[in-house]
Image (tube, rainbow, N blue to C red):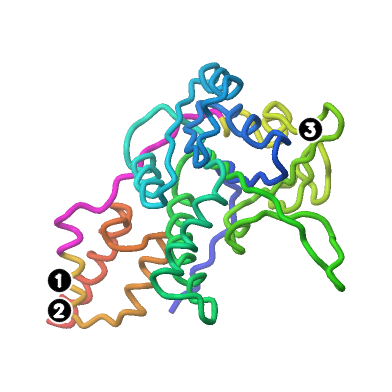
């Protein structure tokens, strides 16, 4: 078997960022200041005049929901349909995650933290879709105290799904100091945002550092697997008795929960692979 490594090349990735901080520090204002925002408002806060005006100015819209399944469906539509929006804002995700935990507790109970496992499955599904979405993604979260030894308060962290920050290249804590709002870089995979650095927290500053042309380009819709492809890949898997851990890796690699969510080209590669293997076995 030949080696398959290739020389790495830098790519321009869409911004995926988490904003967290206390009430009134400017998380929502900053998030909807990004280009053409599609705001998913989970606390019905976007009816305030200041937010309405910013959304109108930036060509944005708002969808209000407190239901996680509605959120998933909206993200799927943004992933697969042609539209003019460039930034998805979920504000805040904390509310929907807490609702997920409550529903999971009723379904499976809380013994040994079972409700966390149940809720986190749905969160992983959401994060997989967000990774594929060709839009800037900004999630806001409430803040909570972070404790050290003897319950000493070390500072603040985000109040949501514990592994939420794995998705993001950038995590900012937002603070208000006097009349100024600042961002503190808590996690970074971006060279122009050094770890621990502080900066004036606004869209223009982030755009200058990240690349305005990346943040403001049009979104490209993704074509999903069609019905015939799904039927064919399932037929081949059953016919060839492909083990679950094998085809599950195909789903994981494409950040898909099920075959119906796989990208068109990705599922076709699976079909081509299985067809060739079947023909080889027949020969």
Left or right, 8 with respect to 105, comes to right
Q: Mark 1 points at which residue?
A: 235
Q: Residues within 10 Å of mark 1 (few under 14, many from 20)?
A: few
Q: Locate residue 202, reporting x and y percent.
A: 71, 29
What residue sits 74% from the left and 46% below the top?
173
Q: Name the residue under label 3.
A: 181
**Along the polypeptide, which appears first: circle 2 or circle 3?**
3
SS at mark 3 in the image:
strand
Residue 56: percent from left, percent from top? 51, 18
User: Gap in Å between the C-alphas at discs 2 and 3?
Assistant: 60 Å
Can you tell which of label 2 and label 3 is closer to the viewer?
3
Q: What stretch of residues is rendered in magenta?
A: 216-231
Task: Let me know if residue 114 appears in the view.
Answer: yes
User: Alpha-carbon distance for marks 1 and 2?
Assistant: 6 Å
Disc 1 element: helix
Indicate whether residue 82 is drawn in magenta: no
260 or 47: nearer the viewer: 47
Q: Is residue 12 visible?
A: no
Distance from Cα at disc 1 to Cα at disc 3: 56 Å
Label 2 belongs to which residue? 239
Q: Looking at the rendered structure, which numbered label has been put on residue 30?
A: none
Q: In front of the other: label 1 or label 3?
A: 3
Q: Is mark 1 in CB contact (under 8 Å) with mark 2?
A: yes
Foreground residue among 140 and 199: 140
Residue 245, compared with residue 126, is above or below; it is below
Task: State the image coordinates of residue 62 (x, y, percent, origin top left).
Answer: 45, 30
């Amino acid at each position: 078997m030949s080696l398959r490594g290739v020389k790495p090349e830098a790519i321009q990735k869409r911004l995926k960022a988490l904003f967290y901080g206390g009430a009134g520090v400017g998380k929502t204002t900053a998030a909807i200041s990004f280009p053409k925002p599609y705001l998913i408002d989970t606390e019905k806060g976007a009816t305030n005049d200041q937010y309405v005006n910013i959304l109108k100015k930036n060509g944005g819209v708002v969808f209000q929901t407190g239901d996680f399944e509605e959120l998933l469906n909206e993200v799927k539509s943004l992933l697969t349909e042609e539209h003019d929006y460039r930034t998805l804002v979920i504000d805040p995700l904390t509310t929907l995650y807490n609702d997920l935990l409550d529903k999971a507790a009723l379904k499976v109970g809380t013994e040994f933290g079972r409700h966390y496992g149940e809720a986190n499955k749905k969160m992983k599904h959401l994060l997989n879709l967000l990774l594929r979405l060709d839009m800037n993604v900004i999630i806001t979260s409430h803040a909570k105290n972070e404790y050290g030894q003897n319950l000493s308060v070390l500072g603040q962290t985000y109040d949501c799904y514990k592994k939420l920050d794995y998705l993001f290249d950038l995590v900012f804590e937002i603070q208000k100091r006097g009349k100024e709002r600042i961002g503190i870089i808590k996690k970074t995979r971006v060279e122009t945002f050094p770890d621990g650095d502080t900066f004036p927290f606004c869209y223009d500053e982030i755009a200058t550092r990240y690349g305005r042309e990346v943040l403001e380009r049009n979104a490209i819709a993704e074509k999903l697997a069609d019905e015939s492809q799904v039927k064919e890949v399932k037929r081949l898997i059953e016919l060839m008795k492909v083990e679950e851990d094998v085809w599950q890796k195909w789903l994981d690699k494409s950040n898909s929960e099920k075959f119906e969510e796989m990208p068109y080209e990705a599922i076709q590669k699976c079909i081509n692979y299985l067809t060739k293997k079947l023909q080889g076995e027949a020969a």
